Image (cartoon, grey):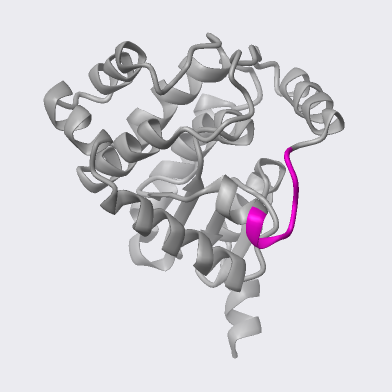
Amino acid sequence: MGSVISLEAVRRMRSRDRRLGGDRPRASFYFDLADPGTYLAAERVDLLFPGVTWIPASLEALRAGLGLREPAPAERASTAERAAALNMPLVWPDVHPAPRRAAMRAAAHACANGAGGAFVLAASRLAFCGGFDLDDPEVLAEAAAAAGLPLDDVLGAVGDPRHDADMEAATARLLAAGADRLPAIRVGRSLFCGEARLAEASALRRDPAPERRRAQ
């Protein structure tokens, strides 16, 4: 997947993180599996932000909160250009754009059980690398298996509407913080919106001194 990340550089970064430990600000990644930006970002998030917290949010609720309509054709074109720049394949699901309620409930279950990253990586690849419908139980079963989650538990989560309220609450927090798009990553007190800002977020996590100066 892609060729934009030096694995040796990532190993050095993670070794530095282990040495510095608590000096690194905490990172949280807000995502929606209906958003192709999540697919474009997920692998780099997993590599660049060890220990990141994966938080399901609602792209539909965010767009509604911003007064936006469905994505324009230009947004699809810009996503395709971004995928090409990252050297990542991009296959549009037949039902895109559409909310992925079942898949997001399953993702919420995965995040609550420490498998959020693995599930999001698998599910987003199935959706935007394979063009599969994530709300198809057989496709969800593939993502659950990749994340090491019992299928019965995942299918049970799909039928649990309580996850929806948690995602809407997370989205409300993002809107209150000034978010204008997904995915978004929070590093300490700083919020970065859009997958193109991952490098900026990673730089802040490696050197949090500027954020500390702003907080003083």
Residue 8 drawn at (x, y percent): 51, 27
Work out whether 80 lies above or below 172.
above
Work out whether 74 lies above or below 113.
above
Name the residue rendered at 71%, 23% in the picture: 86
Residue 147 drawn at (x, y percent): 27, 25
Q: Give the prevailing secondary structure in the magenta stretch.
A: loop
Name the residue rendered at 45%, 55% in the picture: 28
- For the view shown, which residue lies furthest in the right direction? 74
**Frontmost residue, 43 versus 5:** 43
Say whether residue 184 is visible. no
Work out whether 161 lies above or below 129.
below
Residue 14 drawn at (x, y percent): 42, 43
Q: Quadrant of residue 149?
A: top left
Where the N terminus falls, by quadrant?
top right
Q: Quadrant of residue 118?
A: top left
Q: Is residue 1 magenta?
A: no
Q: Which residues are magenta?
A: 64-70
Name the residue rendered at 31%, 50% in the picture: 163
**Frontmost residue, 71 versus 16:** 71
Apparent side of residue 158 relative to residue 29 in the rendered image (left or right): left
Residue 176 drawn at (x, y percent): 59, 73
Apparent side of residue 61 relative to residue 181 in the rendered image (left or right): left
Work out whether 100 lies above or below 172.
above
